[in-house]
Image: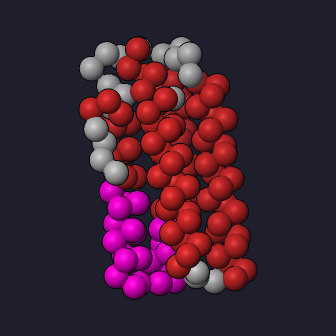
């Protein structure tokens, strides 16, 4: 997935973080296609966990500071994303790596990112036009 112009928020630091997330997702997708397994997946889950803590806090603070109408929805959706990743981490540590479940997680992440960035995050543009 690419950070297309219509997905940009107008805040360079947030857009740069979104780009890094999209690149990490694509990188893991390539790793999975090449037959890599457990260690890269564990690292990917760790990245998503940290991203969920750091980036979401930055973005939520930005939305609140600019009184963005989507601030509450943004927080709720971030919570749902973190819960999805926490559940997959718990499953991974209980049951180990499963390439089909990893592909399913990538699909869920792709859908979440496309919808969230395209409908919620972009509302920041109203506060900071590009």
Q: Depth check: 129 or 110 in front?
A: 110
Residue 37, image x and y in percent?
A: 47, 84
Image mark count: 0
Corner quadrant of residue 89: bottom right
Magenta residue check for 111: no
Residue 60, image x and y in percent?
A: 55, 31
Q: Residue at x 70, y 70 (%)?
A: 90
Answer whether residue 46 is visible to the viewer in this image: no
Q: Residue at x 55, y 76 (%)?
A: 100
Question: In the displayed structure, would residue 80 be above or below residue 67?
Answer: below
Q: Depth check: 65 or 111 in front?
A: 111
Tell me: 8 left or right of 32: left
Q: Residue at x 51, y 69 (%)?
A: 103
Tell me: 17 left or right of 70: left
Magenta residue check for 40: yes
Residue 93, image x and y in percent?
A: 67, 78
Q: Tell me, what colour scheme is on the image?
A: secondary structure
Query: What secondary structure is the stretch in magenta mostly built from?
Result: helix
Please report the bounds of the magenta region as a residue range: 23-45
Tell me: 3 left or right of 68: left
Residue 21, image x and y in percent?
A: 40, 52
Answer whether residue 27 is visible to the viewer in this image: yes
Q: Depth check: 1 or 121 in front?
A: 1
């Amino acid at each position: 997935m690419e950070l297309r112009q219509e997905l940009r928020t107008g805040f360079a630091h947030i857009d740069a973080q979104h780009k890094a997330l999209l690149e990490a997702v694509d990188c893991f997708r390539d790793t999975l296609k090449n037959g890599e397994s457990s260690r890269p997946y564990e690292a990917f889950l760790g990245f998503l966990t940290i991203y969920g803590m750091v980036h979401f806090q930055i973005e939520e603070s930005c939305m609140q500071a600019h009184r963005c109408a989507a601030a509450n929805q943004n927080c709720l959706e971030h919570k749902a994303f973190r819960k999805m990743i926490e559940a997959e981490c718990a499953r991974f540590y209980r049951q180990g790596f499963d390439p089909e479940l990893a592909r399913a997680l990538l699909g869920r992440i792709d859908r979440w990112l496309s919808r969230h960035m395209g409908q919620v995050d972009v509302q920041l543009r109203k506060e900071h036009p590009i």
